[in-house]
Image (cartoon, rainbow, N blue to C red):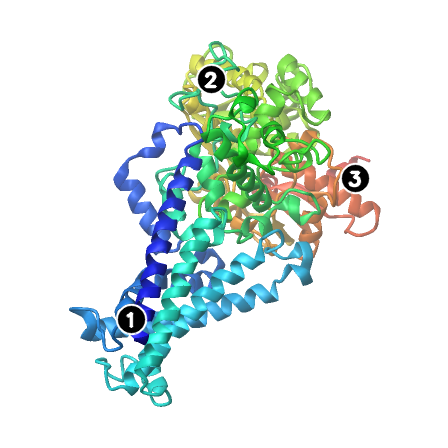
Amino acid sequence: MLYIVLGVITTLFAVVGLGMFAVGVSRMVRIVGVGRPVEKERKGPFGRRLTNTLIETLGHTRMLKWRWIGVAHWFVMVSFPLLAFTVAEAHGEVWDPHFHLPVIHDWTVYGLAIEVITALSLVALVGLAAYRQVKNPKRLGRASRFANSRSWQAYYVEAYIFLLLVSIFLIRGIKVAMDDFAFPVWATPVSHALGAVMPASEPLLAVIAAFKLIISWLFFMALAAILTMGVGWHRFTAPVNIYFKRNADGAPALGAAKPMMDAKGEKPLDFEEADPDEDPFGVGKIEDFTWKGLLDFTTCTECGRCQSQCPAWNTGKPLSPKKLVMDLREHAYEKAPYLLQGITEETLAEKQDESHAGVDVLALLQKPLVGTEEEGGVIDPDVLWSCTNCGACVEQCPVDIEHIDHILDMRRYQVMIESSFPSEANTLLKNLENKGNPWGMAEDKRLDWISEVDFEVPVVEEKLPEGTEYLFWVGCAGALEDRAKKTTKAIAELLHMAGVKFAVLGGMEACTGDPARRLGMEYVFQMLAQQNVETLNEIGATKIVASCPHCFNTLGNEYPQLGGEYEVVHHSQLLSKLVDDGRLTPVQPIDEKITYHDPCFLGRHNKVYTPPRDIMAQVPGVKTQEMHRHKERGFCCGAGGARMWMEERIGKRINTERVDEALTTDPDTVSTACPFCQVMLGDAINEKKSKGEAKETLEVVDVSQLLLRSVKGDAPKPGEQEKENA
């Protein structure tokens, strides 16, 4: 009688659980489908995308960035599909404790696999649960990557898996005691050890099997009831989200900013033909996101890796990439059911019925996507404008959420439709539109640096001079900002010494548009970009060397969106190659301890980590010391995302935080390979000097300046020449 009761109960749980889960999946698909269409490129090629999905999922390539945590999670992940066999077997065991799966029930390899995965998953789960306690946000506050996560959901999932794993071993132990276990001791040592102390009780086995089934189907019911339980749903949604990631080759959504697309997602938006009433100018409502965006929000596991690496969050600002995604998810799942019913502000009155009782549907429909707490906004403006576009969140996310694309889309709507953005950015946009550079300086000023070098620098007039190997894209900072001009002159001199034939555009060069695009003003970006593409195509440019990583990224990754196809290298890549080829030879020792700062748009966005370090390694006498956060986990200087032209009013300044970290290495020099970083870090170091917190001789220099000092043999350290002249 016991077995019949248990069998009926567990069967009912299975039927209800499967039914609820199917309904939950259907609801989730419909809600995600509220979003706009995605670009057709996301749907293929099938083979490449499937291969990458399998590599990322089964290989855990992104999770393993966190070493033991990635390994532990792999065992827990593998246990889910493999141990489903034991759940199937339990459905027979509640009816008959001697039930076995057909065919495989006595395969030693099967018994060994279940034993190993169950044991290691149990160890892994305990380790992960302990780690969650060590990093408990109640104790660590903002320093915990689990801050803002809904801990009870994680505890529930962990408890379910723990009980499931324990149940498997208990059942196997009872079967050993009952002498009804086909696997040898060497393959199943834990089960046999338990069998030595467990009773040979058939009713107990059936009860434990029923318990295992009930908690398993309750888990599926919980998922169906709470569609926003990312920590539970991600095991189903993550592979799908990875498959549809922006880049089919598996690269994260870094480098190029995603272009604005028309309402059908078929082609980039043409501002001459676009209609803001039909074509989306960014994202102003949750339904303006693509369905891939809504799938991103659904897939978030609330692990907090993005938050732990975010420079804004780490310096006391309100932006948490994790919380931003969670807030958008909650809003989407709250609003979408009404959208699916065709309910809008206009149709609300005629469609209102008792099903909306207790819900202020009008307030929900009118809720601004971006707005202050007083306005009832989903995302606070300070959250939106704290982002530096550094890419740390995208780089770290194990399920390929595209945070920057979503932030940029919301910025676009705020800037182009609402005209709501930090006031300082007004000056930036006016200068870009009227003068073609962020500082608003005359175009002839771009040639001033040439008068400060003692060799000829060819300036393009109509066509590139014959025999030119590279067009040297100087960039706005490199031509107009005093500290960055030193880098420009160093690069030009090194190219001249190496016999590289290069030319510059001078007044014909305009800002690439990076600050405008990252601010959200796509119109100004396209205006500047189209002007530059036309110029580059007319002069016959094919190979470009850029000193600014932002120019490097925009020219190489974003101009192809507008018909500008060029071979673009960063100056550190070219100079490193010239040293390797013997065209530049560092001879003068530089006996200094140097720490290198990775520019975000050179490193994370474009994976250029080695060339700058190779240059320093070739300079005699240099002793390098990495900061704690470097390469993929490097910390931003605070200038990206157009933040260089916006005041930092909340929390600690990001450049100050980075310099504090640099000072822990006790450097003689801080090196980098970006004019923005040079300015930001230089400002923070000067502030430290004024307070007596840094060496008076400490300077920020570009790797090209270090190389030039060593190649020339008699060049003073940057800063020393100024002191001599004084």
Q: Amino acid at mark 3?
A: Lys
Q: Residue furthest right?
A: 691
Residue 3 drawn at (x, y percent): 30, 74
Q: Of 232 and 528, which appears nearest the observer?
A: 232
* Image-based side of 167 in relation to 259, left or right: left
Q: Secondary structure at mark 2?
A: helix
Dot in front, 1 or 2:
1
Specify which label sits upstream in the sequence, 1 or 3: 1
Mark 1 lies on residue:
4
* Residue positioned 27% across, 38% down in the render: 46
Specify which label sits upstream in the sequence, 2 or 3: 2
- Marks 2 and 3 sit apart, C-alpha to C-alpha, by 42 Å
* Residue positioned 63% across, 18% down in the render: 432
Mark 3 lies on residue:
723
Dot in front, 2 or 3:
2
Viewport quadrant of the N terminus: bottom left
* Position above or below: 724 against 206: above
Task: Judge whether residue 719 can be spotted in this image.
Answer: no
Q: Of 535 and 121, which appears nearest the observer?
A: 121
* Position above or below: 379 against 36: below
Specify which label sits upstream in the sequence, 1 or 2: 1
Residue 431 drawn at (x, y percent): 67, 17
* Position above or below: 75 against 15: below
Where residue 533 is drawn, which disc sits there? 2
Q: Marks 2 and 1: in contact by CB < 8 Å?
A: no
Viewport quadrant of the C terminus: top right
Tell me the quarter of the picture where residue 64 sits: bottom left
Dot in front, 1 or 3:
1
